[in-house]
Amino acid sequence: MFRRAFLIDFTAGSALEGAVKGGLVDKAIAVDCKCPFCGKVNSVVVPESGLEAYNNGEHVQVAFPELTADQREMVKTGICVECWNKMFKTAS
Ligand SMILES: [Zn+2]
């Protein structure tokens, strides 16, 4: 039902804009989010309309209400759950 997007390397800046402009989006799109810390790639499926809204400056919570907080964080920053937990939840 959805096509896979290209790899988004968040260490090189957001590529969401490129995903939209490149015509790679369908009704839903799998965004590959590369974690800037561990390099792990996680796919998050988002609706095309949400991706466009986000690209146009909409807040991530508003653009992707169907995603979990963890998924939104991955779309926004690329940071995976493991690294997020390491940094902010179980810091010792
Ligand atoms: Zn990570």
Image (cartoon, grey):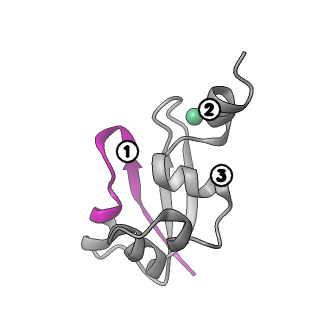
- In the depicted structure, whether residue 92 falls above or below residue 63: above
Q: Is residue 13 magenta?
A: yes
Q: Which residue is mark 2?
A: 83
Q: Which circle, 2 or 1, is nearer the viewer?
A: 2
* Residue found 47% across the figure and 46% down from its top: 77
Between 67 and 59, which is closer to the camera in this rendering?
A: 59
Between 24 and 68, which is closer to the camera in this rendering?
A: 68
- Asked if disc 3 and disc 2 are in contact, CB closer than 8 Å, the reply is no
Sort mark 1 into few (<14), some (14-19) or many (20+) by Cα contacts within 10 Å: some
Does the residue tagged 2 have its C-beta within 8 Å of any atom of ligand 1?
yes
Q: Earlier in the sequence, mark 1 or mark 3?
A: 1
Between 7 and 89, which is closer to the camera in this rendering?
A: 89
Query: How far is disc 2 from disc 1 in space, using C-alphas?
Result: 16 Å
Q: Which residue is mark 1?
A: 9
In magenta, the rendered stretch is 1-18
Q: Circle 3 sits in a helix, a strand or a loop, which is it?
A: helix
Q: Which mark is residue 52?
A: none
* Residue type, label 1: Asp
In which of the image's four quarters is ligand 1 placed? top right
